[in-house]
């Protein structure tokens, strides 16, 4: 089992107010989806930013994520889809979570309660959890967590991303 994923789930399990997730390849699996929904149903804001179909370079991963969208949305999880041409002229003035081309999301990060910050190589998908060699750091730093959360919030807002909703 992934030590990175296990450590992340411990920190997420301690959340009291908010969990922000950025993962270009987001396929939570049954247990991951259940964990996120359980947190949302406890009144914790859970927001996930991932690539839209237009921005991804691996359609099969997007299809895997699409299987969980309705369940996550019904469970109270906020979902955001990065637009292909995200970013604007002022984007260079702050931390960016997109790749240098601003075409797709690249950062893998998680913020818990604007106190704990995770940055690493791990996408939240089965391949990263079970097959790849992944690494990351979890940092107890409210200052850093607030900065990364602010970047996440910017990237989750229009015109950078679409808010995914049930129709």
Image (cartoon, helix red, strand yellow):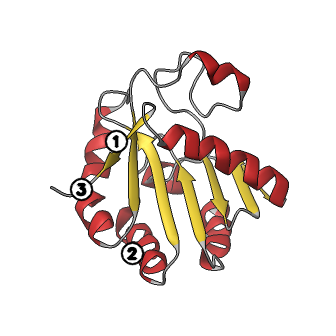
Give the answer, above or below, for where 112 lies relative to 102. below
Q: Is residue 152 left or right of residue 50?
A: right
* Numbered disc in front, either 1 or 2: 2
Q: Residue furthest left?
A: 167
Q: Residue at x 71, y 62 (%)?
A: 114
**N-terminal of the two: label 3 or label 1?**
1
**Residue 82, located in which quarter of the rendered image?**
top left
Q: Which residue is mark 2?
A: 34
**N-terminal of the two: label 3 or label 2?**
2
State if disc 1 and disc 3 touch (CB < 8 Å): no
State if disc 2 and disc 3 touch (CB < 8 Å): no
Q: Give the number of the disc on residue 67.
A: 3
Quarter of the image that includes the C terminus: bottom left
Is residue 39 at least partly visible in the picture? Answer: yes
**Residue 110, located in which quarter of the rendered image?**
bottom right
The x, y position of residue 137, in whole percent, is: 77, 53
Which one is in front, 92 or 100?
Answer: 92
Q: Secondary structure at mark 3?
A: helix
Which one is in front, 107 or 96?
Answer: 96
């Amino acid at each position: 089992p992934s030590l990175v994923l296990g450590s992340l789930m411990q920190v997420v399990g301690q959340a009291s107010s908010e969990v922000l997730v950025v993962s270009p390849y987001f396929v939570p699996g049954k247990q991951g989806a259940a964990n996120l929904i359980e947190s949302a149903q406890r009144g914790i804001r859970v927001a996930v930013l991932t690539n839209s179909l237009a921005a991804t370079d691996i359609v099969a991963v997007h299809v895997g994520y699409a299987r969980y969208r309705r369940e996550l949305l019904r469970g109270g999880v906020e979902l955001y889809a990065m637009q292909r041409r995200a970013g604007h002229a002022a984007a260079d003035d702050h931390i960016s979570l997109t790749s240098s081309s601003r075409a797709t999301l690249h950062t893998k990060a998680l913020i818990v309660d604007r106190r704990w910050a995770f940055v690493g190589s791990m996408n939240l998908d089965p391949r990263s959890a079970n097959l790849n060699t992944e690494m990351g750091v979890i940092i107890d730093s409210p200052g850093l967590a607030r900065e990364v959360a602010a970047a996440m919030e910017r990237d989750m807002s229009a015109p950078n991303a679409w808010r995914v909703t049930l129709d």
